[in-house]
Image (cartoon, rainbow, N blue to C red):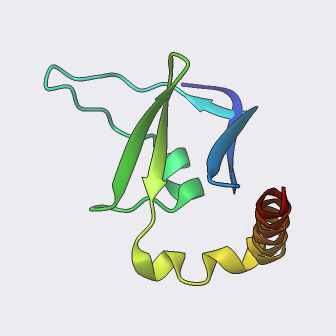
Amino acid sequence: MRFSELTIHKMYMYGIDSFSMVVSMVEIATVTSKSMVTIPSSIRRKHGIKNGDKVQFVEVDGVVMMIPVKSLSEMHGLDKQHAKALIEGIRELNREHRKEARE
């Protein structure tokens, strides 16, 4: 059953994972007697989840999120899109460390 749409944005900066949610897709699934859940096909297609893929369940403030776990080959080069922010974060930390060392 589809209600609306849900998008979860994950951001990693300064060693902290941050999540923000924007409603964009919501599907309902039923838990079986063996505690199994079928991921709706629309979600599998949208996120490229295939047979044998791993998913991670994360609980944050009473909300359970299912996050597809990428293989190492899929993650190759992933940091390039955030390279500028990562480099600036490292530079800022280095400036702070130098300032604290002088004090």
Say whether residue 89 is left or right of residue 48: right
Q: Residue at 55%, 47% (x, y): give it.
A: 42
Instruction: State the image quarter where residue 25 is shown.
Output: top right
- Closest to the observer: 92 or 77? 92
Residue drawn at the location 82% of the way across and 59% of the way down: 96
Q: Quadrant of residue 86?
A: bottom right
Question: Eyeballing the image, is 2 above or below 10?
Answer: above
Looking at the image, can residue 7 be seen?
A: no
Rendered-image quadrant of the C terminus: bottom right
Is residue 92 among what the camera can see? yes
* As drawn, 89 above or below 14: below
Q: Name the side, left or right, on which 26 lies relative to 87.
A: left
Q: Where is residue 13 in the image (x, y as percent from the top left)?
A: 71, 55
Residue under the point 85% across and 70% down: 88
The mark tally for this picture is: 0
Q: Viewed as shown, does residue 77 lie left or right of 93?
A: left
Q: Where is residue 69 in the image (x, y as percent from the top left)?
A: 42, 58
From this view, report whether residue 72 is shown above or below residue 103.
Answer: below
